[in-house]
Image (cartoon, grey):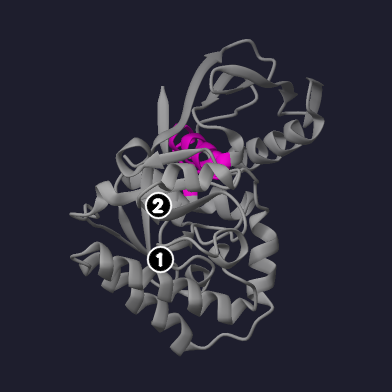
Amino acid sequence: MIFSHGKLLLTSEYVVLDGALALAVPTKWGQEFFIEEISDHRSTVYWTALHQGKPWLNAEIDYHRQIISNTNIPDAAEFILKVLLKVQQLSFTQLRADSSYKIITNLQFPADFGLGSSSTLMNNLAQWAEIDAFELNESCLGGSGYDIAVAQKKNAILYQSQPKRTITETQFNPLFKDELIFIHLNQKQNSRDGINLYRSRDKSDALIEEFSIITRKVLEANSLEEFSELMTLHEKKLSDFLGIETVKEKFFENCPVFVKSLGAWGGDFVLSSRFLGFEAYFRERGFSTIFSYDELIY
């Protein structure tokens, strides 16, 4: 069995694409990958994808003839075929035409959590096929690659995509972590929409460096007050640049503490801190999925 952890990006969402230093952490949940090779000269992949142990996708794919012979979700099966063909192109050992494969994947978290259902799959496949996970991910999905780095390191990382990919394992274990909470916004955000908006804006080296500085300061923060100020500053700078309101302005205007988007703005998880009556506050606004730091982060 191969396993990759999911991820959360704490700083430098979007600007990580242009080389801003980013802080990312692995989640306890991830994706499992089981594989059995069958020497039958049929070149068929029997793919079963489970979501939290429950069947989601079934597909039979002839990777030699590039045909999907049977599936319950055609679009998902087409994506799997695309990925398998790229794996075959990159690998010297796997997906040769003299073997079939029985593959079972199990995503341990809800697919709409945005914790890396695709990146964990890319990393698992790359480990099995002994190929470069970053190359596979770039070919099939794009993005900065930080999520692949988290899956590989299984630790908090500082990540830069430019001028060359730099990954540094770090310790993010703040004294105030028990005060931090993660709230799910109950709506899967299309990260490509946010990326397209970001790419449409003119960027400067100074802007990228501003977020790198915030990331470094976040690692050095010794108090919740200092950390909260940095989170608020991060949101304000990105909001001004993108020209869209922050998640706090949109959903939690009267919240007495900071609320910061994680990853694509407008969906997935946000980061905040405990305050008197916080659970009731968020649930009254329709957000009842709340995790403590230790419940979610590996």
Give the magenta-colored segment's residue range.
113-133
| Nearer to us in this view, 41 or 71 | 71
Q: Is residue 40 magenta?
A: no
Q: What is the tally of numbered marks visible in this picture?
A: 2
* 68 versus 286 height, above or below: above
For the C terminus, give its image quadrant.
top left
* 44 versus 178 height, above or below: above
* 137 versus 58 height, above or below: below
Q: Look at the image and tell me whether residue 46 can be seen.
A: no
Q: What secondary structure prevails in the magenta region? A: helix
Residue position marked by numbered label 2 in the rendering = 149
Residue position marked by numbered label 1 in the rendering = 165
Report x, y in % for residue 239. Answer: 56, 75
Q: Secondary structure at mark 2?
A: helix
Can you tell which quarter of the image residue 154 is in?
Answer: top left
Can you tell which quarter of the image residue 74 is in?
Answer: top right
Dot label at residue 38: none
What residue do we see at 22% from left, 54% from top? Answer: 176
